[in-house]
Amino acid sequence: MEPTGILTAGFAGLGFQEILLIAVVAVLLFGGKKIGELGKGMGEGIKNFKEALKGSEDKKEEEKVEEKK
């Protein structure tokens, strides 16, 4: 019988232990402060990307309105 549910669930085929090991190694290599700065930078990048997408959608809508005039 194959294990199901939580036992096989994971991110990209990785289990909890593997993810924990990767996190510990990352903290040891980069330090907690660098990891936090990296996370903050990634969050700001995602936010800016979403704002840029929203801005381009707004611009397209304005162009459609101008074409109808």
Image (cartoon, rainbow, N blue to C red):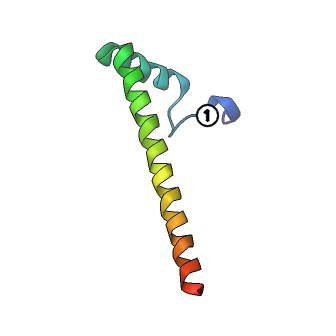
Q: Residue furthest left?
A: 29
- Up the image or down, 4 lies above or below 19; here it is below
Mark 1 element type: loop
- Up the image or down, 13 lies above or below 33; here it is below
| Front position in the image: 61 or 32 | 61
Q: Could you tell whether 55 is left or right of 69 in the image?
A: left
How packed is label 1: few (under 14 Cα within 10 Å), some, or many (20 or more)? few
Q: What's under tag 1, amino acid-wise?
A: Thr
- Residue 69: percent from the left, percent from the top? 59, 86
Say which quadrant the N terminus sits in. top right
Q: Residue drawn at (54%, 24%), measured in percent from left and top?
A: 16
- Residue 20: percent from the left, percent from the top? 48, 20
- Residue 24: percent from the left, percent from the top? 41, 16
- Up the image or down, 49 lies above or below 32; here it is below
Q: Residue drawn at (48%, 63%), measured in percent from left and top?
A: 56
| Front position in the image: 8 or 54 | 54
Which image quadrant is residue 36 in? top left
Which image quadrant is residue 34 in? top left
Q: Residue drawn at (50%, 33%), measured in percent from left and top?
A: 14
Q: Could you tell whether 27 is left or right of 59 in the image?
A: left
Q: Residue furthest front?
A: 69
| Front position in the image: 27 or 51 | 51
- Residue 15: percent from the left, percent from the top? 53, 29
The residue pinned by badge 1 equals 8
| Front position in the image: 8 or 39 | 39
User: Is residue 25 in view?
Assistant: no
Which image quadrant is residue 64 in? bottom right
* Number of marks in picture: 1
User: Is residue 13 in view?
Assistant: yes
Q: Residue drawn at (66%, 36%), measured in percent from left and top?
A: 2
